[in-house]
Image: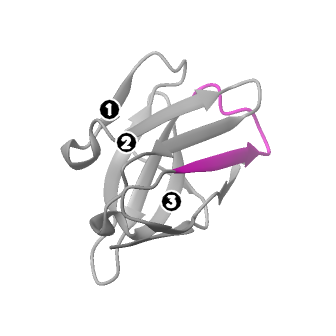
Amino acid sequence: QVQLVESGGGLVQAGDSLKLSCAASGRAVSSYVMGWFRQAPGKEREFVTEISADGGSTYIRDSVKGRFTISRDNAKNTVYLQMNNLKPEDTAVYYCAARPDRSLRYDTWGQGTQVTVSS
C-alpha cells in the first residue's frame, strides 16, 4: 500500500515560484506513473501533469506548459512539481497521485496541498 504526502504549498504573488513535493511511503513507487492534479474552488479536479515510472517521459496540460515541470527521484521515492510564473488561475488544492505503470486509473491519492496565488 502506497501513501502519498504533499508539501510545499503556500500563498504567493503572481509571477512567483513554488516547488511542491510528494513523498511516497509504504512501498517504492519506481514502477508507478506519478501525476499531479488540482482542484480550484467550485470546479472539478483536473489533470495537470504526469511522469512515467522511469522519468523518461512526461505529459502536461497546455495551460501550464512552459511554466510547470514535473520530476521524480526514485531513490528518494519523491515526485516534484516546479511551478514558475504562477498566475491567480493556478490557485487550487494540488494533489499527488499514483497509478501502476500498466493501469490507466490513478488509485492512490495524497491529501492535497493548497496553493494560493494573489494578483
Mark 3 or 2, nearer chain start: 2
Asked if residue 21 lies in the magenta stretch, the reply is yes
Dot 3: element? strand
Dot 2: element? strand
Vertical relation: 16 (above or below) 81: below
Dot 1: element? strand
Residue contact between numbered discs 1 and 2, judged by CB atoms under 8 Å: yes
Residue contact between numbered discs 1 and 3, judged by CB atoms under 8 Å: no
Vertical relation: 83 (above or below) 75: below
* Side of 88 relative to 96 (left or right): left
Three-letter code for the amino acid on which mark 1 is drawn: Tyr
Observer-nearest of 6 and 18: 18
Residue 81 appearing in the image: yes
Alpha carbon distance from label 3 to label 2: 11 Å
Three-letter code for the amino acid on which mark 2 is drawn: Thr
Q: Determine crowd level at label 3: few under 14, some 14-19, many 20+ residues with C-alpha closer than 10 A.
A: many
Q: Mark 1 highlights which residue? A: 59
Query: Which residue is drawn at the image coordinates 66% and 27% (left, top)?
Result: 73
Instruction: Report which quarter residue 45 is drawn in.
Output: bottom left
Vertical relation: 116 (above or below) 4: below
x, y percentage for residue 11?
53, 72
* Side of 58 relative to 113 (left or right): left
Q: Mark 2 highlights which residue? A: 49
Vertical relation: 99 (above or below) 73: below
Magenta region, main secondary structure: strand
